[in-house]
Each structure stands twice: as C-alpha cells, then as structure tokens.
Image (cartoon, grey):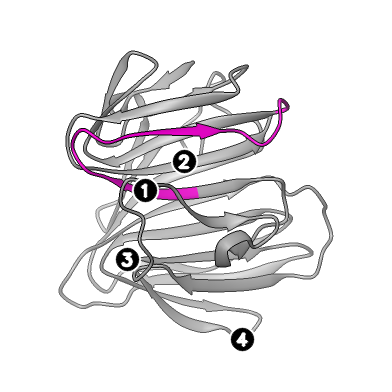
Amino acid sequence: MIVHLSESRGQADHGWLKSWHTFSFADYYNPKRMNFGALRVLNDDFIAPGMGFGTHPHKDMEIITIPLSGALQHKDSMGNTEVIRKGEVQIMSAGTGIRHSEFNASSSDEVTLLQIWVFPNKEGITPRYEQKDFSKIDKQNKLLPVVTPDRREGSVLINQNAFFYLGDLKEGASITYRKTSKDQGIYLFVINGEIILNNTKFRSRDAAGVENQDEISILALADSEILLIEVPL
C-alpha cells in the first residue's frame, strides 16, 4: 500500500488559487510522485471568488472535475458553457485538442474542487464533454459509480478502463470493494472524515494506493466522504 498523507502533498499558493498536488504538477516535482498507474493528476483546488483559470489547451487526457463546494463556470472550444456544482461530475476527453477556461461563478464565495487527470487508452479521439448531477442518487454506506468505461448505473463515460466511485459513510459503516481485474490498482482519497484501510487510519485529504490486492475493506471511524478510483497499473 502506498500512503499519501495530506501534509505530504505539493502545495502552491497563487493568492487567488490555493492548490494541493498529490502527484507532480506544475512547479511541484517529486520523482516518486509521478502517477499511480493511469492516474496522473489529483489536484485539490481552492479558488477565490470571481477568479479562475483563463483559456488554456489540453490534449490526449481524460480530465475529471468534482466540485466540493461552490459553483464553477466552464467554457470550452466545443461551445459548452456550463456551471458545475457539488454533487455533479464533469469529464472532458481532450483527444485531438481542446481549449477551456474555469472560473469561480460566485463573486462572494470560494469554490473548492478536485481535478483529476487520467491517461486515455486511446489517443487522437474526437474531443468530448459530459456532465451529470448525482446529488439526488443515494450513496450512503455504499459506492456510487460516477465515471466508468461502460456507463454503468448512469455514470459518465471515460476513455480508459477506469472506475470512479463516490461514497458517504456513516460512522461505524464498513464496505468492501473488489477490483475488476488483477491488472488494476485501487486509489482511495478521503474527501472528509476518518477511515481505516488495511489497519491504517486515514483522515481528511489523506490517500492510499493499493496494488496486488483483489479487494479492500473500509471502516468509517466518523461520518466520511470518500472517492475511490480504480485504474490500470
């Protein structure tokens, strides 16, 4: 098990943007933190009111955005103009190339989000955008699939054999996850709360990557919100 505690992450403070990087990104470089299999980036971003990322390009990457609070204004070169909020999940398959901007849609409230990059299993595809609201779907004491390669249970589509799940665990709840194949790894990120995984305690913003283990069991020591990602290694 690879342990990535919250305080071990790279950090950037641009005033309007405070960001914590689980893996090497921008000015943060750690040769031991390049990726976890196909999982390349996991950024924990806090964006000040009215501020954001100007128009910039991406290519051949699957980019998933999960807002944790506030509202994020998205615009891209495909003509999509959307606002995404907590409970929603957005994915862009950058493919042959896409340009987009992301701004805090509020002039008074901070927006917080996770932005995650996954290497695609096929390059040069036509760029694609998808967004869905999962806020009304029950995920208490279970794992709700939100991003998958087969749209299972109404999830959004990813161009990779990767699976994203969100779960809300009540204190004392225990769940087990079994991965889809031996070639995959499991990456668990604690959004909020406190859990035990493999006899190790993890708190808010801690994470762990599990290899060579077919299934994992998670015990919630407090009410907890978790993100589980299964990716090819």
| Amino acid type of the residue that numbered disc 3 sits on in the rendered structure | Lys
- Label 1 with label 2: CB-CB less than 8 Å: yes
| Amino acid type of the residue that numbered disc 1 sits on in the rendered structure | Gly
Q: Residues within 10 Å of mark 3 (few under 14, many from 20)?
A: some
Residue at image position (41%, 67%) is 134
Q: Nearer the viewer, mark 4 or mark 2?
A: 2
Q: Nearer the viewer, mark 3 or mark 4?
A: 3
Q: Nearer the viewer, residue 11 or 230?
A: 230
Instruction: Tell me how far mark 2 sits from mark 3, CA to CA.
Output: 17 Å
Q: Nearer the viewer, mark 3 or mark 1?
A: 1
Mark 1 or mark 2, which has the lower sequence index? Answer: 1
- Label 3 with label 4: CB-CB less than 8 Å: no
Query: Residue 37 occupies which quadrant of the picture?
Result: top right
Q: Residues within 10 Å of mark 2 (few under 14, many from 20)?
A: many
The residue singled out by tag 4 in the image is: 79
Per the image, label 1 sits on a secondary structure element best described as strand
Q: Is residue 166 magenta?
A: yes
Instruction: Tell me how far mark 3 sits from mark 4, CA to CA.
Output: 23 Å
| Amino acid type of the residue that numbered disc 4 sits on in the rendered structure | Gly
Q: Nearer the viewer, mark 2 or mark 3?
A: 2
The residue singled out by tag 2 in the image is: 228
Q: Nearer the viewer, mark 1 or mark 4?
A: 1
Mark 1 or mark 4, which has the lower sequence index? Answer: 4
Residue at image position (39%, 16%) is 198
The residue singled out by tag 3 in the image is: 86
x, y (%) of residue 173?
26, 36
Segment colored magenta: 165-183
Per the image, label 3 sits on a secondary structure element best described as loop
The residue singled out by tag 1 in the image is: 167
Mark 4 or mark 2, which has the lower sequence index? Answer: 4
